[in-house]
Each structure stands twice: as C-alpha cells, then as structure tokens.
Amino acid sequence: MARLPRLTLPGYPHHVIQRGNNRQAIFATLADYRMLLDLLEETAKKFDVAVHAYVLMSNHFHLLATPQTADGLPKMMQAVGRSYVRYFNDTQKRTGTLWEGRYKSTLIQTDRYLLACMAYIDLNPVRAGLVAQPQDYPWSSHLHYRGVRPDRLITPHALYWELGNTPFAREAAYAELVQNGITPVQQAAITQATLSGWALGEADFVTDLQKRTDRRVAKAGAGRPFSVNKSTQR
C-alpha cells in the first residue's frame, strides 16, 4: 500500500516528532543543542512557520508549530534535517544517516488540544526521568513561558495570550496548567495521533478538515475522537 503524504495545512498547529535513527543520540555536546535551535529559528523565519513550543531530548525532538503556507513546514523540516546532519557528521567525524526516516506529525484542533500539547511537550523531560520539574530542563520552551528567559525561536499562540491580561498572569496560569499535567489518556492520544499522522480533533473538526484536503485525515472506521479534559486548559 502506498504511503500517505503528510497531513499539512496552513493555519493549523502541527505537533512534530523527529527521532534519531534506531533511537541513537542526536546530540553529543551542548553546542549541538544550540546549533539545532539556531537552525530551527533561521528556517522558521525563512519558511514562515510559527514555532509555539519545543523540547530537545537526547535522541529526538518535538515541535508545536503553525505553518502559514502549505509547504512551509515540510520545507523547514527538510532544511533543518539536512543542515544539522551535515554539521553533526562533520563535527563527530561520522557518515551516514542520523534521522529515523521521515518526521512524524499530526494536525491538531486548536481550541481543544493546543495547550494540552504544549504541556505534553514541556513534560517530556519529566516523564523521561531527566528532571523533577519542567523548569529544571534547559532545552525546551518552558522557561520562555515561565518568564525566566526570552526565546527568539518562540511565537506564542493566541491561546497563550488569553491565559491572562498581564505577563505575570499568563506566566502563572501557564505554570499551573503544566503543573496540573495531562492524563495518561491524553498523553496516549497525542502520541498515537502524531505517530500515525491522523488529525487530532473532535468529530465536527475532523469532518470540516476533510473538506479542506484530498488527503484522508482520519483512520477509516475510527472511534469517537479523543477529548481533552478542560481542566488542562484553564
């Protein structure tokens, strides 16, 4: 069976995962983390992609991003992937592939899933046992949203601005949102949707989305769409 093209539509947030080949490490030094962030910043601007959240793990990374054009996100990921592999192979005196094939992604329903997906991304280092709290991990966008340090890569989504009328209020509300965490059901739904490439949203959203693309957006015969607990979006 032919592989489906990625589901990518402008104006919608997309959750992206890119993994190292055979789960191998994609960073060897602190400079490698900085290089990948620089490449993401450069290409996001070049291809008109708003990056709302990210986390760089030892053998993979996550992005939450909204492209403004139909090919912006694929072009950005292709450019980042190629440039980083050249850099990494040169510095590590190695050859061959670094990535585990194509990046994985899902298109998500903004009002129901965006903030939950941001929390999911921020909590990755905690789930992996690397840190006790997300603010203890340096290679994510969480510290930007906590007001600890500015991050030039980040473009906050409108839903973040709605968390409060002042920077302090927004930062406090977001910190509470992430502290509350997400349920195992939410975590599984976000992971499954991203790895499978099906849209993550309620039935009406998926139905409307299908009208905007010839690419199938949901698995045939899929059950009722997963619904995020509203408590995570306070």
Image: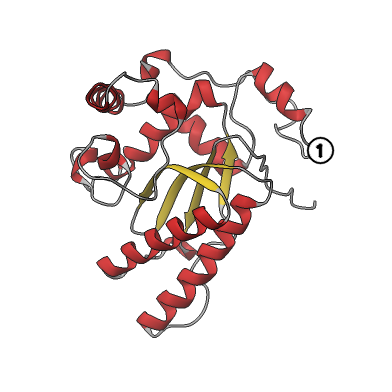
- Residue 99, compared with residue 224, is above or below; it is below
Q: Position of residue 22 (x, y in %)?
A: 47, 63
In the rendered image, the quadrant that contains the C terminus is top left
User: What type is the residue that disc 1 sits on?
Assistant: Asp
Element type at marker 1? loop
* Residue at position x 42%, y 14% in the image: 230
Q: Position of residue 126 (x, y in %)?
A: 26, 40
Q: Position of residue 27 (x, y in %)?
A: 34, 66
Pick the front one: 4 or 207: 207
Describe residue 35's horizontal placement relative to residue 204 as left or right.
left
Describe residue 9's horizontal placement relative to residue 132 as left or right.
right
Pick the front one: 180 or 3: 180
Describe residue 80's horizontal placement relative to residue 223 as left or right.
left
Describe residue 182's horizontal placement relative to residue 225 as left or right.
left
Residue beneath disc 1: 214
- Residue 152, compared with residue 207, is above or below; it is below
Location of residue 40 by image quarter: bottom left
Q: How did the renderer colour the structure? A: secondary structure
